[in-house]
Every structure is written in structure tokens, then in C-alpha cells.
């Protein structure tokens, strides 16, 4: 790789005296080579090559982004910050540019500068879920969780299709024992981000949230909290009617039964009052005979691999049908369905 690197640089030096089109092509090739090196973990050489690409095209924001990120991965945070500052001053700087600089600030625990940066970014990109999440994480790093959740909620409201705000908000509400909101945000996250390293973790939290929510007295307790919104009270009211307290520990069968009765009742009573894509999604799956398969998929790690495997063997058509459905669709959330402000 090192030999190829020097050979490539020799080619670059030979071509540098060519016409403008050749120079642009060379800068692009340098950038592509640097990206390959980053993927291989060779951050030192990636930074060197990107510096040369920057010399050819100093106003190329894409090259600056790659340089900032490569320097960050190299742990040369001073270089990453220097490049990031230059990047965010560009007229075409996007939310990702601010995110990259913010990552470098967080790496050196410069949270004050990071906060200033994200406030500037939000004035420019008021609907950026990425920036709201990054800003919230800055508060979380300083253990200011009440400020963090405000930003995660704003991110969910402003950019409902960005998954990380749901992930972090769900984890926050688990710690706060707000089992309804934890369950809703966890399920939304799993539909937006179905196959990642975070997916299995959130599946476990979703199952835990449901078992806690259906425990004796929990629904009433949440109904009486001052922070519970009108929408949440409607949801809790129907869940309360749908719940039949099990004699023993709450199982996946109990959860499935409650979720099924809730989906049917919500469609009949509140669908028009509170349009909510997650509930419409549940109702569609119910109508297609796929809701049980969906619920098992959501909670598979917690019910146990053997239990899930037995269910799949006993319901091969439903299991295959849900898998095919999931792989053929993209879950999208529209604006205007945020009901979590009092």
C-alpha cells in the first residue's frame, strides 16, 4: 500500500502541470485514494493525500470534509478543528460540516465551543435532526440530561425521519421509567433503523418497556403524571382497557394480546383525531396477518432465540411474509405528527 501510495504521488506530480480538467480529475482521484486509505485504517497517509488534494482545490467542501474526518480519525484534533472551522465558513457548508467540527470539539471536551457551534448551525438548519442530536449529546456529556432531552425531542419534532434522536430519547425515558414514551420511541427507531448495531439493544429496551408498562398500576401512574400529554393519555386510556392483568410474569403472548386490542380500538376511535404513522403501520400489518410476526421480530432477543425459532417454525407463512414485507418497504414518517408537547 505504501509503494502504491508513492507511485500515485509520482503520477500526481507528473500530471500537476496539465490542463485544468486534468487537475480536477487528479484532485478527485486523490480524494478517492484517500477514502480507500481511510477504510483500511491508514489515516496518516489519507491526511497527506487530502492535503495535496486541498492544494489543488482549496474551495472543494467535499475534500475539506474528508480531511477533517481523516484528521479526526487520526486523533489529530487540532488539524480537524482547523479544517472544520474553514469548512463551516464556506457558503455551501451543510449540516454535516458542522457535525464534523462538533465531533472534534467533543473529542477534546471543548463543550462550550461545541454548544456555540451547534446553536449557529441550528439558526442555519432549524430542521436538522442531525444537529439536534449532536447538540443534545453535548449536554449529555456534561450530564445535563434535562437539557439533552429537550434537544432530542426538538429533533424528533423537526426531522421525524432521523433515527438517532429516537434512540437517545428512548434510552433517556427508560432511565426515567416513562415506559410509554420509551416504548413508542423504541418502536419508531426500530422501523427507521432495522439492521444496525443499535437495533438489538433497543429491541431489549422495547420488551422491557412493555413488561413494565403492563405491570400493575403503571398505566394509571403515567396517566396521572403532569408531563403526560393529551395524546399519551388517550393511548394510555385504550391500553388500560385492553390490558388484562396476567396471573404470572408478563410474556410475549400478553404483550401481543394487548397490542392487538389496542391497534383495533385506536383505529376505531382515535385514528382521525391523532393521525400517527406508527399506529397506521400496526393496523396495516394486522390487516395483512403480519402483526404477530412483526411483534415477535421487535422483541425477538428478549423472548429468547429458541422461543422465536419455535414460533417461526409453527408460523412459516407469517414469518416469511413479514420478512418479505420489511425488505420491500422504506418506513417514512411525515411531519406534523408530534404530540408530545403539553
Image (cartoon, helix red, strand yellow):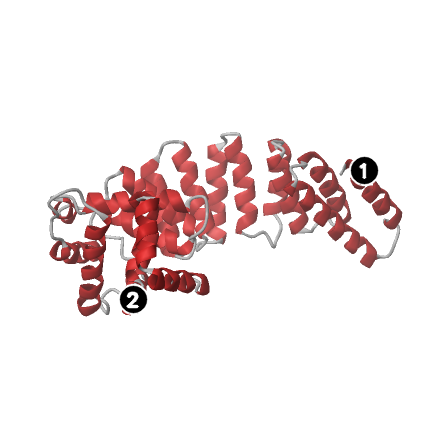
Image height of 235 relative to 218, above or below: below
- Is 309 left, or right, of 327 in this rendering? left
Residue 255 is situated, as x and y percent measured from the top left of the image, at 22, 52
Q: In which quadrant of the rendered image does the N terminus lie?
A: top right
- Is 50 left, or right, of 99 in this rendering? right
Which element carries disc 2, helix, strand or loop?
loop
- Residue at (39% x, 51% y) in the render: 155
Q: Earlier in the sequence, mark 1 or mark 2?
A: 1
Hey, which residue is sitting farthest top in the picture?
Answer: 108
Question: Contact, CB < 8 Å: mark 1 with mark 2?
Answer: no
Observer-nearest residue: 266 or 242? 242
- Is 166 left, or right, of 7 in this rendering? left
- Residue at (33% x, 63% y) in the render: 318
Eye-nearest disc, 1 or 2: 2
- Residue at (60% x, 55% y) in the render: 92
Image height of 298 relative to 260, above or below: above
Which element carries disc 1, helix, strand or loop?
helix
Label 2 belongs to which residue?
289
- Residue at (11% x, 52% y) in the render: 244
Query: Which of the 4 image quadrants contains residue 19?
Result: bottom right
Residue 107 is situated, as x and y percent measured from the top left of the image, at 52, 32
Q: Can residue 230 be seen in this view?
A: no
Alpha-carbon neighbours of circle 2 within 10 Å: few (<14), some, or many (≥20)?
some
Observer-nearest residue: 197 or 246? 246
For the residues labelled 1 and 2, the Cα–Cα distance comes to 59 Å
Label 1 belongs to which residue?
3
Residue 71 is situated, as x and y percent measured from the top left of the image, at 64, 36
Alpha-carbon neighbours of circle 1 within 10 Å: few (<14), some, or many (≥20)?
few
Observer-nearest residue: 17 or 9? 9
For residue 122, which numbered disc appears in the image?
Answer: none
Q: Is residue 260 visible?
A: yes
Image height of 101 relative to 335, above or below: above
Amino acid at each position: 500500500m505504501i509503494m502504491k501510495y508513492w507511485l500515485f504521488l509520482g503520477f500526481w506530480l507528473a500530471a500537476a502541470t496539465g490542463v485544468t480538467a486534468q487537475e480536477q480529475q487528479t484532485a478527485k482521484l486523490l480524494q478517492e485514494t484517500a477514502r480507500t486509505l481511510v477504510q483500511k485504517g491508514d489515516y496518516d497517509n489519507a491526511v497527506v493525500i487530502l492535503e495535496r488534494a486541498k492544494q489543488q482545490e482549496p474551495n472543494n467542501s467535499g475534500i475539506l470534509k474528508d480531511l477533517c474526518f481523516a484528521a479526526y480519525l487520526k486523533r489529530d484534533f487540532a488539524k480537524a478543528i482547523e479544517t472544520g472551522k474553514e469548512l463551516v465558513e464556506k457558503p455551501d457548508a451543510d449540516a454535516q460540516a458542522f457535525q464534523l467540527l462538533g465531533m472534534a470539539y467533543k473529542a477534546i471536551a471543548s463543550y462550550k465551543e461545541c454548544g456555540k457551534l451547534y446553536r449557529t448551525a441550528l439558526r442555519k438548519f432549524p430542521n436538522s435532526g442531525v444537529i439536534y442530536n449532536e447538540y443534545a449529546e453535548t449536554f449529555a456529556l456534561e450530564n445535563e440530561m434535562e437539557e439533552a432531552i429537550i434537544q432530542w425531542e426538538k429533533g424528533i419534532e423537526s426531522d421525524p425521519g432521523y433515527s438517532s434522536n429516537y434512540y437517545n430519547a428512548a434510552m433517556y425515558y427508560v432511565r426515567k421509567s416513562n415506559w410509554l414514551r420509551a416504548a413508542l420511541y423504541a418502536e419508531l427507531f426500530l422501523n427507521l433503523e432495522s439492521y444496525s448495531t443499535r437495533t438489538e439493544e433497543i429491541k431489549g429496551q422495547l420488551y422491557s418497556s412493555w413488561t413494565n408498562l403492563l405491570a400493575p398500576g403503571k398505566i394509571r401512574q403515567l396517566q396521572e403524571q403532569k408531563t403526560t400529554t393529551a395524546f399519551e393519555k388517550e393511548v394510555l386510556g385504550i391500553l388500560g382497557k385492553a390490558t388484562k392483568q396476567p396471573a404470572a410474569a408478563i410474556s410475549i403472548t400478553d404483550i401481543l394480546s394487548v397490542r392487538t386490542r389496542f391497534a383495533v380500538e385506536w383505529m376505531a376511535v382515535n385514528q382521525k383525531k391523532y393521525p400517527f404513522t406508527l399506529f397506521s403501520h400496526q393496523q396495516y400489518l394486522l390487516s395483512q396477518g403480519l402483526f404477530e410476526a412483526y411483534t415477535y421480530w421487535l422483541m425477538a432477543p428478549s423472548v429468547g432465540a429458541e422461543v422465536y425459532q419455535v414460533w417461526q417454525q409453527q408460523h412459516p407463512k407469517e414469518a416469511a411474509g413479514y420478512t418479505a414485507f420489511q425488505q420491500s418497504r422504506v418506513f417514512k414518517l411525515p411531519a406534523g405528527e408530534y404530540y408530545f408537547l403539553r
